[in-house]
Image (cartoon, rainbow, N blue to C red):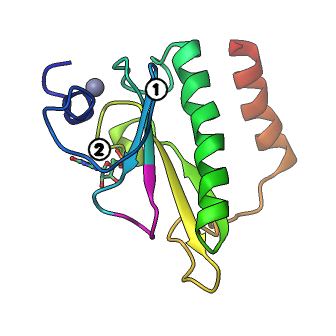
Amino acid sequence: MENCIFCKIIAGKLPCIKIYEDEQVLAFSDINPVSNGHTLVIPKNHAENLWKIAAEDLTAVHLCSKKIIQAMKDALNLSGVACVQLNGSSVNQTVMHYHLHLIPRAVDGPSLPLGPWKMQQGTLESIQDTADKIIAAL
Ligand code: 5GP
Ligand code: ZN
């Protein structure tokens, strides 16, 4: 896609620090790392988000993420990896090409600005009501 930064990276028109590449996916270092090792995994076929991505590309991205977080575990002294994926500008997606963030947390490193979530107690009735709406749409 013409004006997509990540498509330009895939095409080699913009540089990146490449971690892994195969026919379906590219993994590269995020230019604004939340923590050391912050990596993005993207499908080579342009798709904006989880609603749009083809099943085989989604599978390839997530199988790749498994390989990469294993390598992170082996190579970096980490205590965990957050896998984060945003859909829509209202939830802070800024690049409209599907991407999975792999964000390691170093042993003894600072907590990631991803959680803990602000939990609030729900009522069983409202949780059930919303679940019923989703289930009915499946
Ligand atoms: P989003 O908020 O859309 O989930 O995250 C987009 C991510 O892409 C951000 O973490 C941002 O730092 C990263 N990013 C944006 N432009 C570039 C770029 O040109 N190169 C690289 N390597 N990362 C980028
Ligand atoms: Zn794209």
- Viewer-nearest residue: 103 or 95: 103
Q: Residue at x 19, y 44 (%)?
A: 15
Callout 2 crowding tier (Cα within 10 Å): few <14, some 14–19, many ≥20: few
* Lateral position of residue 70 relative to residue 48, left or right: right
* Lateral position of residue 20 relative to residue 125, left or right: left
Q: Amino acid at mark 1?
A: Asp
Based on the picture, tell me whether residue 119 belongs to the magenta stretch. Answer: no
Q: Residue 44, percent across and down?
A: 37, 22
Q: Residue at x 34, y 30 (%)?
A: 97
Of the image marks 2 and 1, the number of the one nearer the N terminus: 1
- Measured in 3D between alpha carbons, the distance from the residue under mark 2 to the one under mark 1, in whole angstroms, is 25 Å
Q: Residue furthest bottom?
A: 108
Callout 1 crowding tier (Cα within 10 Å): few <14, some 14–19, many ≥20: few
Quarter placement of the C terminus: top right
Q: Residue 111, percent across and down?
A: 57, 78
Q: Residue at x 84, y 41 (%)?
A: 125
- Viewer-nearest residue: 1 or 91: 1
Task: Find residue 22 and name its label.
Answer: 1
Tell me the magenta residue range.
Answer: 33-39
Confirm if mark 2 falls within 8 A of ligand 1.
yes
Q: Amino acid at mark 2?
A: Thr
Q: Residue 66, percent across and down?
A: 66, 42
Residue linked to disc 2: 94
